[in-house]
Amino acid sequence: MGTSFEKAPFYAQISLKGTLLCLKGNKDHAARRKYFSKAFTQNNLLEWEGTLKKGVRRAILGMKEKGREEGKEVDVLKAVTEMSLKIMVELCFGEMGEEGGEKIPKANDGPTRAAIIDGVHSEVIFTENGSKRKVLYLLRSLPLPLFITRWIFQPSVKESVQQLKQNYLTKPDDFKNTILARAIGKNEEDTGLPDGILVKEAKAFIVAGTDTTANAATYLFWVVLKHPEVKAKLQEEVDSLPEDFSISQVQALPYLQLVITETLRIFQPERWENPTPEMKDSYMPFGIGARVCIGQQLAQMELALSAAMLFREFHNVRIAPSMTEQDMIVEDHFAMSPKGHNFMVVL
Ligand code: HEM
């Protein structure tokens, strides 16, 4: 919202306090945002095309692997959450992974896990006033007790920041487009942000950019699959892309854009063919004003790419028989997510 609206007090209580996402004072926030806004300019976003495409391809490979058996159900929510998580880690620290799911090196895996854990930690606080169910679900899904996992993986984010600093200072051209690069000190005058803050910011970006985008992608899939006429129109459009399409071509697909816009609202994409000024003014899934989501264009690129690539790949995908409407009821925590904590499809 405008600068006279401050963040809610709980942002000052969570483990990510002091980051761009949580800073309360307008001046402090504006100063911090300057470090990161250049990473999110249109030109820099286009530099991330390869990382995004690779991330979606990894998710497709993983889904294919899981759905190999005829009629086997595949969890879209899980696949796109892993996808967004790895994409965010790579955008923060530079590409380290290889295609094919399992081959992600440990260096990449550490920050990913640390970010999940911080996400869980934040969830614990966020849900203190609300339902505890999601917290219990998340804690159950961790293989180890929370404090042990934090203790094991926390240092890996620090290591990744150190590694990035070294990489950036020795090979600036290869790492200058990472989210964190411009906040790294270059010389005595330009000292950048202290290491401790860089570590926190890395985690905050990963947390802010993962569940949000993954849940939006999951709901996009769900609503499209529930509306065969929408699916048919979208399928025709994404199939019309050339074999080696670019992100700009995907983002120029008019119907896909209507579907994305409407996924973040309710569901009738055609309403956005001729939006009124009032409709545009009241549409704010990414917030508005000084605190507007810094990752808005990135999320829209990721949503467009994943929808185009997944629908092109899986023509016969359908909602799994095990799914009920109840499973997809929105639970509103930090990010909105499906109540059933999964979205099963048959490929
Ligand atoms: C569909 C996906 C997404 C949605 C719906 C979403 C939504 C939002 C909203 C509503 C806010 C503003 C909160 C407020 O008013 O205080 C916000 C802030 C923010 N988002 Fe996103 N977001 C998404 C994806 C991302 C991605 C991919 C990133 C990764 C860069 C990201 C990073 C951030 C950050 C750092 C802030 C804080 C910005 C600031 O205060 O200056 N988000 N997001």
Image: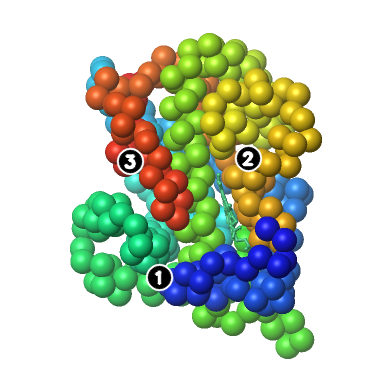
- Residue 226, above or below 49: above
Q: Residue at x 44, y 71 (%)?
A: 14
Type of amino acid at the residue the image marks with label 3: Lys
- Examine the rendering and report whether any part of residue 213 can be seen: yes
Between the C-alphas of marks 3 and 1, the distance is: 32 Å
- Label 3 CB less than 8 angstroms from ligand 1: no
Q: Residue at x 59, y 73 (%)?
A: 23
Give the quarter the ligand 1 occupies: bottom right
Name which residue type carries label 2.
Answer: Met
Using the rendered view, name the quadrant where residue 205 is placed.
bottom right
CB within 8 Å, label 3 to label 1 = no
Whole-percent x, y for residue 344 in the image: 32, 29
SS at circle 3:
loop
Q: Quadrant of the N terminus?
A: bottom right
Mark 2 surroundings within 10 Å by alpha-carbon count, few (fewer than 14), some (14 through 19), many (20 or more)? many
Q: How many marks?
A: 3
| Residue matched to label 1 | 156
- Labelled disc at residue 301: 2
Q: What residue type is disc 1 on?
A: Ser
Rendered image: mark on residue 231: none
Judged left or right of residue 97, residue 284 is right
Which residue appears at 55% of the width and 76% of the height? 18
* x 60%, y 73%: residue: 24
Identify the disc placed on residue 339.
3
| Residue 250 at least partly seen | no
Q: Is residue 341 left or right of residue 80?
A: left
Of the two numbered discs 3 and 2 on the same chain, state the one appearing first in sequence. Answer: 2
Q: Nearer the viewer, residue 126 or 56?
A: 126
